[in-house]
Image (cartoon, rainbow, N blue to C red):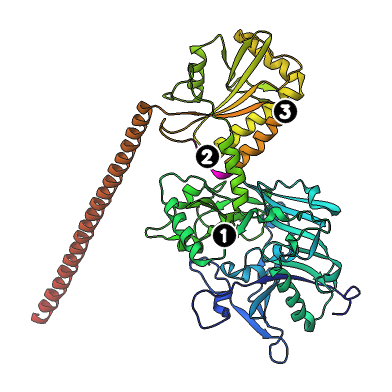
Amino acid sequence: MASTSDRKKIALNVYLLKKRDDGSPCANWAKTEFLARPVGSSGKALLIRTDEYPLGTSGEYGTLYIKKPATESEPEWVQFVSSGVTGSTKLPKLKNRSTSAILVIERNSRQFVIAFGHGRFMIEPRLVEDRFGIRTVLNSISPDKVASIDRQTFDASPRISRVQTVKASSVSDFMINPEQDLLRGLVGFTQRSYRDSLGDVVAGIDSFKASIGIVLSELPGVLDVILERSESTDYLKRDSEGRISQFAWVENLLPIKDRSKIENLEKALWKKLKAPTLENMWLSVPEIFDWSEVTGFRYGTTDKGEIESDLDLKEFMSTLRKGATIETIKRKEIIMQMSSGIPSRRINAFKCIYAEIKLGIDLFILHAGTWFKVEDNFKRGIEKYFSSLPRRAMSAPFIEYNHSGEGDYNEAVCAADPTQYGILDRKLIQFGGKHDKIEVCDIIKTSNSGTNKSYDFFHVKRGRSSANLSHLFAQGLVAATLLVREESFTTDVNAQLTNLGLPSLPSPFSARGNNLVYAIIDGPSTSTLDIPFFSKVTLQNCGKTISAFGYSVALMHIPESATYLAAKAKKSAKKKATKKTVKKAVKSTVKKAAKKAAKKAVKKAVKKAVKKAVKKAAKKTQRAQQLNQ
């Protein structure tokens, strides 16, 4: 292709449609399949109406679909300011008008969809090839020519962030955490050999974006290059000096393509979704958006109903109809209500689910509607660290848990041996900003061995939910860091120890010879301590940093007592029985009310019929009397 640098550029937003796997003899998706069916005000999904224009003498450049009618909406601020316009002056009729169109073109037995305007909302999301844009960009740029990276950090509260530079930078400059970060979007400067075809700068998430100086007749050739780049694995090649690729971390999570494997995963997911407790699963919007423009979320099919301030998986599941399946979720939408006059955004509910699913020895992650297998070597490394961490045996004054809360438990432990153990739970130290308050640990143990003093810092947390554990590991890391770096923090801790009658920490404080113990209260004594996979990743990240300071890091399992577990089971059974009784009572009440209403309706109908019959008989009698006269 000739140089395109001097031509007027066109912004292309290219999607690739998935291959058929439904057994249909037809190779391509029909218009009724690739056009989206948004839910209308009636609550029913309606196919988008379009005008069609074949491009080229025989449609060789695809078919253009223009949505009709064009969308018009009054800006939200108009209604807000209109009350201030007084007298005969009136605001003009103000409307935002937007046009949506898509160009569908086939190349190499694959269908591409190029979106113009708001055309991306015209495409059925289930048919879009996931991560097509990312793969294309990975193979079209150099690792040292990156402009922007979107990544998701897996944790109790998954975070999506965007980091961009003012000039081309190396991947290493973006401080990627290869053990926790999933690549969600990428912008970079195109390799010289692909600039004529793809332009100078390329971007990708699910779609591929570029501004290219081409005319329509050159589009098929560009699409051929884009498809070839998306199918390549050049981004994994070692550099000229034999070093591993800077993009190798992208492979820590591998997308699943096998349909039968996906079906098995979805069956396992649905089973977990129907369970009373939703472990290692939550809802989150799988893309970057501006929270200041969002007023909340709805799980219904229309823009009416209660607005939720945040996404909640349990609440969402309660809105599903009886007999729902995983396919119900795939077709259900979550409405993101916008505050700036922008139409409400509809997000596929299935794409909002994050879940960790184990099948055999393999671990799979569901994120943004795509299943990922955790790469075996990566998984082995994380599991190896978790299993190699020393386990501190539970011994007096620590006891099995049979308490009303963590605070109550911590106090009981320290009260049993106040000469060595001190409670620092909820004893916060203000450090840094005005509102930054830090807890050095929950329980501290002091040991004297001649002139040597050592300390055990216990961080105690009940349960193994991702949120609880994330807080636990972060608390340990922050406190451990401040002790070795900030003498003023150590001084404040010593003031607390003096109040407890315990020996002070040396200042400056050295981590070597001291221990940090993560104590997790969970399950019976017969159970083995285990935590969610990405909690293990967080533990490794925190634990390695803490160890680097010189601390010894260990885990301790605090079992829940048989008495506590029995009381817990009894309470759960009682709650379930109460719920069943209430449900039965409600059903009975509804039945009685319905019976009463039906009886009332019958009585009313009979009364009406009798009244009508009497009236008719009276008319008949009156007519007979008139005839007799």
Write the start and end of the magenta stretch as one range: 529-534
Answer yes or no: do the residues labelled 1 and 2 have beta carbons within 8 Å? no
For disc 2, the marked residue is 531
**Marks 3/2: CA–CA distance:** 25 Å
For marks 3 and 2, the one nearer the N-term is: 2
Would residue 278 be counted in the magenta stretch?
A: no
The amino acid at mark 3 is Phe
Give the foreground label among 3 and 2.
3
One can see residue 336 in this view: yes
For disc 3, the marked residue is 549
The amino acid at mark 2 is Ile
The amino acid at mark 1 is Gly
For disc 1, the marked residue is 369
Quick one: 74 or 433, which is closer to the camera? 433
Quadrant of the drawing holding the N terminus? bottom right
Mark 3: few/some/many CA within 10 Å (<14, 14-19, 20+) = some
Give the foreground label among 1 and 2.
2
Per the image, label 3 sits on a secondary structure element best described as helix
Is residue 600 shown left or right of residue 377? left
- Residue 152 image offset from top left, x and y in percent: 66, 50
Mark 1: few/some/many CA within 10 Å (<14, 14-19, 20+) = some
- Which residue: 70% across, 46% down? 177
Per the image, label 1 sits on a secondary structure element best described as loop
- Which residue: 44% across, 29% down? 559
- Residue 254 image offset from top left, x and y in percent: 61, 58
